[in-house]
Image (cartoon, coloured by chain):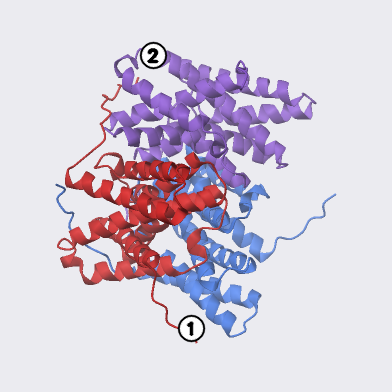
Chain colours: A purple, B red, C blue
Amino acid sequence: MIPFEFPTFFQIFDFVGTLAFAISGIRLAACKNFDWFGAYVVGLTTAIGGGTLRDLFLGVTPFWMTNPFYLICSAIALVWVILFKKQMVRQNNTWFFFDAIGLALFTVTGITKTIGLDFSFWVAIFMGTLTGAAGGILRDVLLNELPLIFRKDIYATACVVGGVVFHVCALLGVGNELNGIITGLTVFVIRILAVRFHITLPILHMDKEKED
Amino acid sequence: MIPFEFPTFFQIFDFVGTLAFAISGIRLAACKNFDWFGAYVVGLTTAIGGGTLRDLFLGVTPFWMTNPFYLICSAIALVWVILFKKQMVRQNNTWFFFDAIGLALFTVTGITKTIGLDFSFWVAIFMGTLTGAAGGILRDVLLNELPLIFRKDIYATACVVGGVVFHVCALLGVGNELNGIITGLTVFVIRILAVRFHITLPILHMDKEKED
Amino acid sequence: MIPFEFPTFFQIFDFVGTLAFAISGIRLAACKNFDWFGAYVVGLTTAIGGGTLRDLFLGVTPFWMTNPFYLICSAIALVWVILFKKQMVRQNNTWFFFDAIGLALFTVTGITKTIGLDFSFWVAIFMGTLTGAAGGILRDVLLNELPLIFRKDIYATACVVGGVVFHVCALLGVGNELNGIITGLTVFVIRILAVRFHITLPILHMDKEKED
């Protein structure tokens, strides 16, 4: 008999973060009248897409292939949206909050996994950002939309800043566990502030050239 | 001298399935006025995209890199569409039939390859579905369209059901060869029935929220 | 102290080629009003996307993870576009020229890397073409556009011809270094001539069928 164990903070954050990412994909799929299966695929891609790309680049087995948790989590997200479709708008603040937790946690796991495989710090920053932000890009590609994070409030940039903070703290001798908390909080706070105050990066404008 | 050998059933099904997948991509590319090379790339992506993703996830060399058969097969599909462009609509039933054979076969190869690498049964179901259905998704991404299989008659769901059937049969002690036939027939029959009777999954409707 | 070394021809071509690829992505991103981060991602994807897919297929660590050169190069490209936005149209010929250099060099590196890993010659031709041309396809997918190279002047076909030339030269006993130069020049000249004289592949026309 497996004794019941209370979930760790990591597991709770991983759960709500994965749920929030999957729900963002499923809601946008619902706006395009996808069927249940299509919505599930988009939700799953949003939740695991970034970490999958990271693992392919790192040359390790994608994380969700050793633990059914992430596939199940995306299924829970689908059931949630089906059941509470009409309440989703009212839940917006909650899901935004969970999404920011996911962004922070996934960035930290991306960084620490890369460091653990002995890659350079700049590869770790890259992989942290990829883990946090690439799922949303893949989601928008599947939905045939321009990737939202390229044009809206600061998102991936929060991951980059988090990565730099992690590296500086590591140089200062901060232990991995504390460093993860500091980095995660950095990403989380930047993301919350960015949305609260509509902080965006500068936009690159250019007129389309006439093709000859 | 290489003695002539009659192709096995597996090889025949692999040929017509690959051909049908490639042709579906090439025809859609032709509707967008792609050039021959572009149409070939879309056809090839449709035919090998699912299995390629599977092999990347499994950490093995993509199957088409050890045997030129699949690149040649896609070239044959291109020549076929160029030659019989005007007859394609009349051939619709044939190609639909071959496409269903491909879907069934690719699902089975995806499952057995994954099982052979000692992954869990749910990973095998996932990989079977990916092998069968992901090529069509990549095709639609290249064509800048919303993935068709997310909104039309049951397609990927047939692969999932096939995967479950495979697992149940394996638990019941059915041998791999017979199990592959049962699973393939399941996928094939579900797909044929789904299109014949327009069986679809429930649609997730939601109104687009106003962006602030 | 690291002694200063003059860059080799390879390094100079790699630099201007990477710069040209990144700039093509960043300019198109600017036409869609992406922010700086989004433009950087599109530029980077254009520059390293083809080689990354190649390395994933070959089962080796993506080339840009062992050398920050390519990430820095894409950052330089971003700064360049921000600073010289108004002059970009006047620089068109220069960047087109550098882009053709990149296409030629990337094709050759794709071929030689694949040969060095003992894959068949047709895999090498495939990988050379992928290295040269796939970045532009991924760029257009991110920009939510139909891939340009499927409908315009000969581009990827130049890589294929280069690959065939490489194989023939290798069969004739030409050494790898000279062969690389011949192959690169072939790709470069074909690309320049294709644009100069608007040489295109035949287009595949087909009317969209009515969906039932």
Left or right, residue A58 beside residue B62:
right
x and y percent of residue B23 in the render? 29, 61
Quarter of the figure with residue A30:
top left
x and y percent of residue C16 in the render? 57, 57
Q: Residue at x 57, y 37 (%)?
A: A66
Distance of label 1 from label 2 (alpha carbons): 68 Å
Chain letter of disc 1?
Answer: B
Q: Residue at x 65, y 60 (%)?
A: C11
Residue corresponding to mark 2? A91
Callout 1: 10 Å neighbours few (<14), some, many (20+)? few
Q: Mark 1 is on which residue type? A: Ile
Q: Which mark is residue C33?
A: none
Q: Residue at x 32, y 19 (%)?
A: A83
Mark 1 or 2, closer to the camera: 1
Left or right, residue C90 beside residue A117:
left
Residues at marks 1 and 2 touching, judged by CB atoms closer than 8 Å? no
x and y percent of residue C98 in the render? 52, 60
Left or right, residue A150 beside residue C180:
left
Q: Mark 2 is on which residue type? A: Gln
Quarter of the figure with residue B160:
top left
Residue corresponding to mark 1? B2
- Tag 1 secondary structure: loop
- Tag 2 secondary structure: loop
Chain letter of disc 2?
Answer: A
